[in-house]
Every structure is written in C-alpha cells, then in structure tokens.
C-alpha cells in the first residue's frame, strides 16, 4: 500500500509539472505572436485590406448590376 501511495504521489507531481509546462508554453506562444503582430508593417496591412475590400465590393456590384468594375477599382488602387 505504501508503494502504491508513493507511485500515485509521483504520478500526481508529474501531471502537475506537465500542466505547468503546457501553461508556460502557451503563454510564451501568445507573447511571441503578440510581439510578431507589433512588428508588422501596418501600412502594408492596410493596403492589402483595402485591395481585398475593393475586390469584394466590385464583385458585389457586378453580381447586382451585371457591370464589370474590376478594372476601375484596381486603377484607383494603383494611383
């Protein structure tokens, strides 16, 4: 009985250590991702978002009116 109790205690301590390792790894990954986001080129992200937004808008216009405005939308982006 004593050996079984010692083994159970060792398993519990190992499980707690594993849980702490997982939490530490998770916190580290989140912090790393946060600092990567801070380092991104925000003007470039805005430009990419703007192009995607304009593409989606042009598709909606074409679906509703039948008029292809893709060329006009991207001319405005390039200017």
Image (cartoon, helix red, strand yellow):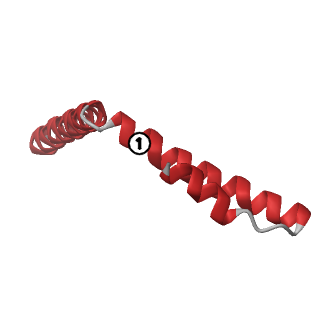
Q: Which residue is at 55% across, 45% downward?
A: 50
Q: Which residue is at 62% across, 49% downward?
A: 53
Q: Residues within 10 Å of mark 1 (few under 14, many from 20)?
A: few
For label 1, the residue is: 45
Answer left or right for 44 relative to 20. Answer: right
Answer left or right for 24 relative to 59. Answer: left
Looking at the rendered structure, the secondary structure element under dot 1 is helix
Viewer-side residue, 49 vs 76: 76
- When asked about the image quadrant of residue 63, the answer is bottom right
**Location of the N terminus (image quadrant):** top left
Q: Is residue 56 above or below residue 18?
A: below
Q: Position of residue 75 (x, y in %)?
A: 57, 57
Q: Which residue is at 26% across, 34% downward?
A: 23
Q: Position of residue 12 (x, y in %)?
A: 21, 37
Single out the residue that lies furthest toward the front. Answer: 79
Q: Is residue 12 above or below residue 63?
A: above
Answer left or right for 68 relative to 31. Answer: right
- When asked about the image quadrant of residue 38, the answer is top left
Q: Position of residue 72 (x, y in %)?
A: 66, 59
Viewer-side residue, 36 vs 46: 46
Viewer-side residue, 22 vs 35: 35
Answer left or right for 45 relative to 71. Answer: left
Q: Position of residue 18 (x, y in %)?
A: 19, 41
């Amino acid at each position: 009985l004593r050996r079984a109790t010692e083994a159970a205690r060792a398993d519990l301590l190992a499980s707690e250590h594993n849980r702490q390792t997982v939490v530490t790894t998770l916190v580290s990954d989140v912090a790393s991702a946060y600092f990567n986001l801070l380092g991104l080129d925000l003007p470039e992200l805005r430009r990419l978002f703007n192009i995607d937004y304009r593409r989606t808008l042009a598709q909606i216009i074409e679906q509703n009116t039948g008029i292809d405005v893709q060329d006009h939308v991207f001319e405005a982006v390039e200017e």
